[in-house]
Amino acid sequence: MTKTATSRWRWKQPSIIPGFGLTLGFSLAYLSLIILIPLTGLVWRTASLGWGQFFSILFDERTLAALYISFGTALIAAVVNAVFGVLICWILVRYDFPGRRLIDAMVDLPFALPTAVAGIALASLYAPKGWIGAFFTPFDIRIAFTPIGIVVALIFIGLPFVVRTVQPVMEEIDREVEEAAATLGANRFQTIFKVLLPGLAPAVLTGFALAFARGVGEYGSVVFIAGNIPYVSEIAPLLIVIRLEEFNYAGATAVATIMLAISFAMLLVINLIQAWSRRRYGYV
Amino acid sequence: MDVTINHIRKEFARFPALNDVSLDIRSGELIALLGPSGSGKTTLLRLIAGLDQPTEGKILFGDEDASHRTVQERNVGFVFQSYALFRHMTVAENIAFGLKVRPSATRPPKAEIRKRVADLLDMVQLTGLDKRYPNQLSGGQRQRVALARAMAIEPRILLLDEPFGALDAKVRKELRRWLREFHDRTGHTTVFVTHDQEEALELADRVVVMSQGKIEQVGTADDVYDRPGSPFVFSFIGSSSELPVTLAGGGVRFNGRPIGIGAAGEGPVDGKARLFFRPQDVVLMDAADALSGKVTACRRLAGTRIAEIDISNGEAKGGKPHHVEIEVPLDAPVTLGADLSFRPTRWRLFFEG
């Protein structure tokens, strides 16, 4: 090969796998249709507002409260899921017990169940007179129709994301790494917290990000359990629907654009952390 | 630290992996467990470490019964075949791990841990790589980090499972020499598992040859190579040829014909036996009472030539052809298809029944 040929920047790396042009073309067209064009339309519609109106919607107290509720509850739910999701993974991967497969299958239920059904079921359970809610009533703790209810719904929705992301990575853990820790004198507690869990961190982070993103966008289950009181338990997606019903399309898209921007920024940060940890530890 | 292995038996799901194995490991010794895969060598190593529990038998560290001690209590250094480094920790953190997890009463102060890590890095010749992560190291470097990590806890005995298995030939040779020097310098009792006889013979003070869950022979490299104790050891160590022979009146016969060697004073005068000899222990000679046959293949091997000879000579009645390999001098006339006669100069007979 001549010098000019090697030094020239090439758009496509030589590969023995055929069909690069075709598959890339299809992927771009597909992503455009499914994601890019709708999102561009969203921003386009918002742009018709002008900056002054946009900021007045953004800094409207009701918008801020809804965004705060949405992102705050999603964050709490994702943290809870990250902790208990890993615990469930541990049980599913490390122990063999009757009913293990059943529990394994149950984890996927929140994926399959219509979210409205989940919301109604949770609302009736956690209502002040519901089976579970009744236990909390004497302590004057209300779960349904408050932000706590939203967190409960989002935990339900987000659990499979953490479990299904961490589980395969946990299954891959080399037994010898644990044995090595044991020969070096580490007890089980130290082995789990100093050796195994740090190794799982990138996977847990991915699961956390997925559960968080899903929680921010969740609508169906939350509207049934949240009570939807403006400024208290009204989530941003609901606010968008309310604006739509008022035929205030620009207002709806403005809130949506803000959500999109915040979500994008947060996912970007999480992805950067992941890329960094992967580079460091050599995870693929 | 002397280690005594006393009639150990280990079963996995009722399948015996080790069957009545006894072995004395002397303090400061470098010992190799050698055998084909499935011979139980890694199982034995894991039992010494306490990673598995024996079904029967005892393991003594010095005079103390270690059989029921946990891995943590045994204080052994174990280097895994896959190295099993903690990949989210730097090289220095990996090495310090065994010290950092100690209860605060026995944990050395931070400064001392740092110093110990620096000393170990120096000892395994990895100074300056302390901030690297395992995936930023080559295979040979990872191997040495694993060794330094095992040494950090000042183990009573060092156990290595196929320590050079995953390395290329050149690095393997270097590390082999390095490990020998390392052992001579530190004087740790060391047991390593290998399926590579060259590695075992070159490196170890004593070699334990294992097969099918049993110890076949324990001895120095000279012992197992020159004085194999069983047919298995003879055929496993080095190359050799095996012939079914009969003994008659103190002479050895193959296919009913005397082959010019005697079995005097070795066992029964008559009966069946198996004759073993090595390719280099033969002499070419033109005699009636010798092994002879047609040359079926001939190949050059470094400074010598190896000829493959079919000695059944069509005389074996219903028997399968017998091919033996012998070394012939470069100047000896060898043509394919021609007859060649030879006699073993050193051999070993194993009597049957």
Image (cartoon, helix red, strand yellow):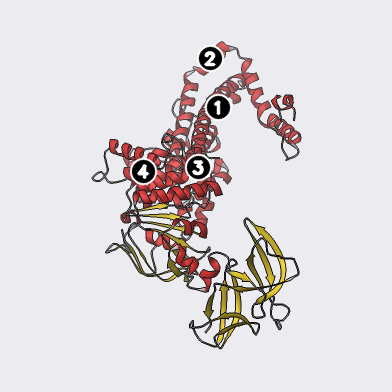
- Left or right of B29: which side holds B311? right
Q: Which label sits in the foreground, 4 or 2?
A: 4
The quarter in which the N terminus of chain A is drawn is top right
For the residue marked with disc 3, what is the amino acid?
Answer: Val
The residues tagged by marks 1 and 2 sit, at their Cα atoms, a distance apart of 19 Å
The residues tagged by marks 4 and 1 sit, at their Cα atoms, a distance apart of 39 Å
Q: Name the residue under label 4.
A: B97
The residues tagged by marks 4 and 2 sit, at their Cα atoms, a distance apart of 54 Å
User: Residue B26, position in %: x, y?
Assistant: 34, 62
**What residue is shown at x 68% (from left), y 26% (from top)?**
A37
User: Residue A223, position in %: x, y?
Assistant: 52, 35
**Which chain's residue wears label 2?**
A
**What residue is shown at x 45% (from left), y 39% (from top)?**
B88
Q: Mark 3 points at which residue?
A: A162
Q: How crowded is mark 3: few (under 14 residues within 10 Å), some or many (20 or more)?
A: many
Secondary structure beneath dot 2 equals helix
For the residue marked with disc 2, what is the amino acid?
Answer: Phe
- Left or right of A175: which side holds B295? right
Q: Residues within 10 Å of mark 4 (few under 14, many from 20)?
A: many
**What residue is shown at x 67% (from left), y 58% (from top)?**
B300
The residues tagged by marks 2 and 3 sit, at their Cα atoms, a distance apart of 36 Å
Q: Visible in this render: residue B86?
A: yes
Q: Circles 2 and 3: CB distance less than 8 Å? A: no
Say which mark, if any, is on residue B79. Answer: none
